[in-house]
Image: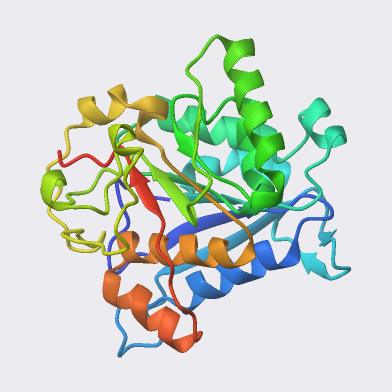
């Protein structure tokens, strides 16, 4: 596969779903529907914006709801091809001590993906966790110095894991945001003047609820990049865009956000219309106009 620094209109955005045993089916199916519905050109049904690959440990993987999904590649193949993917999506469900203590898959895959970005910051990559998938990120220390959220029922466990990882690794703590549908870190495209953009929530704005309006954001497609690779490399995780979401419906909101920044706002709105979704927007932290 040819090296690319970003996805473009005539090239699908490559997405890898990591499915562990007893994963939550809707954490997978909701964002999958959003991404596979998105088009680069609303008038061209063949212009699908995202190409999806499913990875798991076996040829089939059983969800917590009893539905079996066929995987396309093994964990080993996923590691071998990991640099090909623009987006890695980690879902929730069955996030238990057995997986966390053993650091079983998908945890090594998450770590490897973040290391690839640090080694090669010339390419944009996104790590998206749905619902309790963020607990994997918390245990690994991926969220150090970042802001994040998870399903409200797991917020205490999530906060404890984030704090434990910060102490264990002697790193910065995670700013846990409880009132967000999703939280985006290391946003790197041109988003206009931060002072005029209430959609960007800085850590100094903790007392102010961000607006739901997305002002000044530019689509991934056709945007003129003004980003310095050196500056991206200096960011946490090599500039890896890290998105964490709340539960099932919030995960679809996060997927719509991904469509809006990697394809266009218009495409995201069309997906929401087609799926009869009301897109509730989250918050962006550390948005940089570079």
State the residue in front, 163 or 228.
163
- In screen coordinates, is 122 left or right of 218? right
Q: Is residue 146 above or below residue 133?
A: above
The foreground one among 79 and 134 is 134
- Tell me: residue 44, above or below residue 213: below
Q: Is residue 42 left or right of residue 288?
A: right
Q: Residue furthest front?
A: 207
Coloration of the structure image: rainbow
Residue 12 shows in the view: no
Please provide percent x and percent y for residue 199.
Answer: 27, 54
The total of numbered circles placed on residues is 0
Q: Quadrant of the C terminus?
A: top left
Question: From where the camera sits, is residue 200 visible?
Answer: yes
The residue sitting at 28% across, 70% down in the picture is 265
Q: In front here: 208 or 117?
A: 208
- Write down the quadrant of residue 169 in the picture: top right
Residue 209 coordinates in the image, percent (x, y): 34, 51
Vertical comparison of 161 with 188: above or below: above
Q: Is residue 248 above or below residue 115?
A: below
List x then y, in percent, for residue 248. Answer: 63, 64
Instruction: Please tell me which residue is depicted at 22% across the width and 31% down the height of the picture.
Output: 229
In the image, residue 228 lies at what x, y percent? Answer: 17, 32
In the displayed orientation, state which residue is furthest to the top: 170
């Amino acid at each position: 596969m040819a090296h690319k620094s970003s996805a473009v209109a005539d090239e699908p955005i490559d997405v890898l779903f990591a499915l562990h045993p007893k994963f939550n089916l809707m954490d997978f199916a909701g964002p999958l529907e959003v991404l596979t519905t998105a088009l680069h050109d609303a008038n061209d049904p063949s212009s699908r914006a995202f190409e999806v690959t499913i990875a798991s440990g076996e040829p089939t993987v059983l969800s917590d709801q009893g539905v079996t999904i066929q995987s396309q590649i093994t964990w080993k193949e996923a590691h071998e091809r990991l640099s090909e993917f623009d987006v890695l999506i980690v879902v929730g469900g069955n996030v238990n001590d057995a997986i966390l203590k053993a650091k079983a898959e998908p945890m090594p895959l998450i770590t490897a993906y973040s290391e690839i970005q640090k080694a090669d910051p010339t390419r944009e990559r996104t790590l998206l966790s749905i619902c309790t998938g963020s607990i994997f990120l918390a245990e690994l220390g991926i969220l150090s110095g970042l802001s994040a959220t998870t399903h409200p029922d797991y917020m205490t466990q999530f906060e404890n894991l984030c704090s434990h990882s910060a102490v264990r690794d002697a790193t910065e703590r995670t700013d846990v945001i409880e009132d967000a549908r999703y939280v985006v870190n290391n946003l790197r495209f041109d988003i206009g003047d931060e002072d005029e953009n209430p959609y960007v929530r800085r850590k100094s704005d903790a007392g102010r609820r961000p607006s739901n309006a997305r002002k000044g954001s530019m689509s991934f497609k056709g945007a003129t990049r003004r980003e310095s690779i050196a500056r991206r490399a200096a960011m946490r995780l090599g500039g890896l865009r890290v998105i964490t979401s709340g539960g099932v419906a919030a995960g679809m909101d996060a997927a719509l956000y991904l469509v809006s920044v990697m394809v266009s706002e218009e495409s995201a709105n069309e997906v929401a219309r087609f799926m009869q979704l009301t897109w509730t927007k989250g918050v962006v932290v550390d948005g940089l106009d570079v």
